[in-house]
Image (cartoon, grey):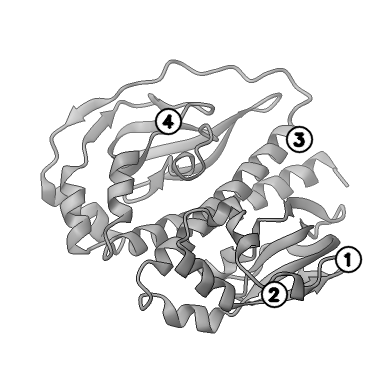
């Protein structure tokens, strides 16, 4: 089994996709803020419901996460080398959503949270790099839970595809209306204000489809008014609503970070909706804005933390109802 002394440079971190966008300097700082630790099969890394903000980077081996239920432990995640563990509690400060146990011997890096927080906003670009890693990590976990939900419902016939995708109608929103949405989310930097005024707005009629699960994702959306339903079509179970989003909430962001197809459907609710559309090029521009990028990424990461926790609850509830043990 690898020992801590085997990892004395950055080559191991550099090969993991979650850190591909880090500069050498930022990766070196992250490495210095972490302590290597060996784990044995069966070691508990985090306990469900416990407090704590530390997160881990899996250098080798693997872990599984599960929830306690009346029908026994229910698995909610399986993670392997190159992935992050525990970042949701670092981001949102809430209790651990599951118990995480090593399912094979390995090596992890434990982040020194106090030192790490002290350099946020001090070392230029570091917070943006780390938040992008969290975004990618959380997106991967949500996709995995989606997969577990699909497996649970796989015994039925294929769910029917709803009506065709709508293009939406272009809407001429005043800059003040666009800025108001961002300001309500605490996104008020001058750079973001300038970008926000250029984003196109589109109106979707009631029950129209904005995108389908499986579509290629080339933009994300911010809700200006109305509501958007995020759902999946599960074989044998029909449409499963994952969340209903209102003003200021963001959707469609996962496909932009991991370049994978859309993981769910997005549909305008009964009153229709107006959204702002932020393209991949807009996002690249935003990532270069020192005053705007960290705040926007914080918003995305908190959204994904909330979604990940909600989907864990949904998965566990479905497993219990199905009597899975």
Q: Position of residue 260 (x, y in %)?
A: 53, 35
Residue position marked by numbered label 2 in the rendering = 50
Asked if the residues shown at circle 1 and circle 3 are in contact, with their CB atoms under 8 angstroms apart, the answer is no
Q: Position of residue 47 (x, y in %)?
A: 75, 70
- Pinpoint residue 269: horizontal percent, then vertical percent: 39, 33
In the figure, 5 relative to 238: above or below? below
Q: Residue at x 57, y 78 (%)?
A: 32
At x 36%, y 46%, the residue is: 246
Residue 100: image x %, image y %?
Answer: 76, 63
Secondary structure under the numbered disc 3 in the rendered image: helix
* Location of mark 3 (residue): 152
Q: Residues within 10 Å of mark 4 (few under 14, many from 20)?
A: many
Residue marked by disc 1: 42
Res. 304 mark? none
Cα distance between the residues tagged 4 and 2: 36 Å
Asked if the residue at tag 1 contacts the one at tag 4, i.e. Cβ–Cβ closer than 8 Å, the answer is no
* Viewer-proximal residue among 239 and 88: 88
Looking at the image, tell me whether mark 4 or mark 1 is earlier in sequence order. 1
Give whichever of 17, 283 is nearer the camera.
17
Q: Is residue 59 above or below residue 319?
A: below
Nearer to me, 2 or 74:
2
- Secondary element under disc 1, as helix, strand or loop, is loop
Residue 145 lies in quadrant: top right
């Amino acid at each position: 089994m690898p020992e801590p002394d085997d990892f004395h440079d950055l080559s191991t971190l550099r090969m993991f996709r979650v850190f591909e966008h880090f500069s050498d300097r930022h990766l070196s700082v992250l490495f210095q803020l972490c302590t290597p630790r060996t784990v044995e099969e069966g070691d508990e890394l985090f306990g469900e419901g416990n407090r704590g903000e530390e997160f881990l980077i899996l250098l080798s081996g693997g872990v599984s996460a599960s929830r306690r239920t009346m029908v026994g432990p229910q698995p909610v995640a399986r993670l392997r080398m190159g992935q992050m563990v525990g970042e949701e509690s670092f981001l949102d400060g809430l209790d651990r959503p599951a118990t995480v146990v090593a399912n094979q011997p390995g090596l992890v890096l434990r982040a020194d949270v106090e030192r790490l927080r002290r350099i946020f906003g001090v070392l230029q670009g570091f917070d943006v790099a780390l938040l992008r890693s969290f975004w990618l990590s959380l997106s991967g976990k949500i996709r995995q839970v989606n997969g577990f939900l699909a497996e649970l419902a796989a015994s039925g016939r294929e769910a029917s595809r709803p009506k065709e995708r709508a293009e939406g109608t272009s809407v001429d929103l005043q800059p003040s209306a666009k800025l108001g949405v961002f300001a309500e989310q605490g996104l008020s930097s001058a750079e973001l204000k300038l970008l926000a005024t250029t984003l196109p707005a589109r109106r979707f009629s009631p029950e129209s489809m904005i995108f389908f699960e499986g579509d290629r994702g080339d933009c994300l959306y911010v809700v200006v008014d109305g509501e958007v339903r995020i759902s999946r079509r599960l074989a044998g179970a029909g449409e499963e609503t994952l969340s209903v989003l209102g003003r200021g909430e963001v959707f469609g962001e996962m496909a932009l970070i991991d370049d994978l197809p859309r993981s769910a459907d997005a549909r305008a609710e009964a009153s229709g909706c107006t959204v702002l559309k932020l393209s991949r090029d807009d996002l690249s521009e935003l990532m270069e804005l020192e005053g705007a990028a960290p705040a926007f990424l914080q918003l995305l990461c908190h959204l994904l933390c909330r979604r990940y926790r909600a989907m864990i609850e949904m998965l566990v509830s479905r497993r219990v109802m199905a009597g899975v043990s």
